[in-house]
Image (tube, grey):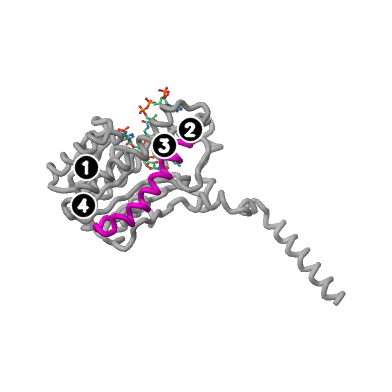
Amino acid sequence: MYNQPMLPAQTFTSKVIIVTGGGTGLGKSMTRYFLELGATVIITSRKIEVLSKTAEELSAATGSTCIPIVCDVRDYDAVEHMLQSAIEKCGKVDMLVNNAAGNFISPTERLSHRAFDSVVDIVLKGTYNCTLACGKYWIENKLSASVLNIVTTYSWTGSGYVVPSACGKAGVLALTRSLAVEWGKYHIRLNAIAPGPFPTEGAWSRLVPPGMEDDFDMAKKNAVGRLGEHQELANLAAYLLSDFAAFMTGEVVVIDGAEWLKGAGEFNMLDKLPTQLWDMMELMRKERGERREERE
Ligand code: HXC
Ligand code: NAP
């Protein structure tokens, strides 16, 4: 059930959505579903060959229009140019998904300042560049709109070994909450999704240390005991972007099988206690109670 499409087929009829990083991974999966729901989708990233291949594949598969436009989200002028071409090609833009990201694992003291910049610039600067350019356009033209930002659960817990990403994502979460309030009066909603592990080539190739795939089995880290399926993330993304979520703004929705809570709860490691030990402790507690009753 959870890997089935969820929303009515006409949910995004006549809507135009920009998805940054839409050529690969989760961006591609969200794009596919938005197209199935009737949207026209602009996918944007640095590699035109990747974008063009995805746009062709998804347009053919869904019968909707997917348009590739190359853009490095770190460059504000390039973002404005991408937005203008999207408006020229489609007449308007209604929604934005800030999904593009950069990440790698490293002890922080080994990073150069350029390495730090490279991740923060894609994640935070890329997100505020796209949000600012689109926001100015929506406000000036009195258009209602919706933005979805893809963050992570370590946006609020922090995480060692991915510190530039944690800093960038924390900033994106602050942007989401701040602008939801400031731009509510313009009928612009902003929400975020914090995904747990959803296998993609981009993330797995950079974040799982080679040869340690078994030790890093992400499915074992959460309460549900499996990895996320792309369709269940796409369902949530489409819902939050759409008018079905008209009263939701400034929210971050976690979809991680309780992974971060499992790491946080003080006694969650008691999962490891065998049933016999619980039985024995219960027996001891009862015996202590009986002895107390005898004494009284
Ligand atoms: C240390 C590194 C490094 C690494 C690059 N650098 N990779 N430092 N460890 N693994 C350093 C370089 O030496 C250089 O510094 C600086 O970073 C810039 O490197 P470039 O290769 O020139 O950067 P660029 O071409 O802009 O590429 C950006 C990138 C790359 C972030 C480094 O990985 C990228 O393009 N990523 C995009 C896709 C991606 O990351 N997807 C995963 C998202 S997953 P010097 O000092 O040498 O000049 C995600 C999920 C989180 O976010 C949660 C999962 C559960
Ligand atoms: P991915 O396939 O590597 O996606 C990252 C995308 O960002 C790529 O398409 C890349 O395209 C684009 N990109 C990178 N730098 C860019 C730039 N400067 N300008 C424009 N586009 C740029 O990884 P993914 O796993 O699908 O990640 C998608 C999102 O989900 C990210 O925000 C990530 O942090 C988040 N997330 C993923 C997971 C997971 O388990 N997969 C978990 C939590 C959060 P180009 O290289 O062509 O530019």
Which label sits on residue 105? 2
Q: Amino acid at mark 1?
A: Ile
Residue 135 is inside the magenta segment: no
| CA distance separating discs 2 and 4 | 39 Å
Dot 1 or dot 4: first in sequence order is 1
The kind of secondary structure element at disc 2 is loop
Dot 2 or dot 3: first in sequence order is 2
Apparent side of residue 20 relative to residue 208 in the rendered image (left or right): left
Residue 180 is inside the magenta segment: yes
Apparent side of residue 3 relative to residue 157 in the rendered image (left or right): left
Q: Quadrant of the C terminus?
A: bottom right
Dot 3 or dot 4: first in sequence order is 4
Q: Residue at x 23, y 34 (%)?
A: 77
Q: Amino acid at mark 3?
A: Ala
| CA distance separating discs 1 and 4 | 20 Å
Residue 133 percent coordinates (x, y): 24, 43
The answer to whether any part of residue 202 appears in the image is no
Mark 1, residue position: 42
Pointer 3 residue Cβ closer than 8 Å to ligand 1: yes
Q: Quadrant of the N terminus?
A: bottom left
Which label sits on residue 277? none
Residue 44 percent coordinates (x, y): 25, 38
Dot 2 or dot 1: first in sequence order is 1
Mark 3, residue position: 203
First to last magenta residue range? 162-188
Q: Residues within 10 Å of mark 2 (few under 14, many from 20)?
A: some
Q: Amino acid at mark 2?
A: Ile
| CA distance separating discs 3 and 4 | 35 Å
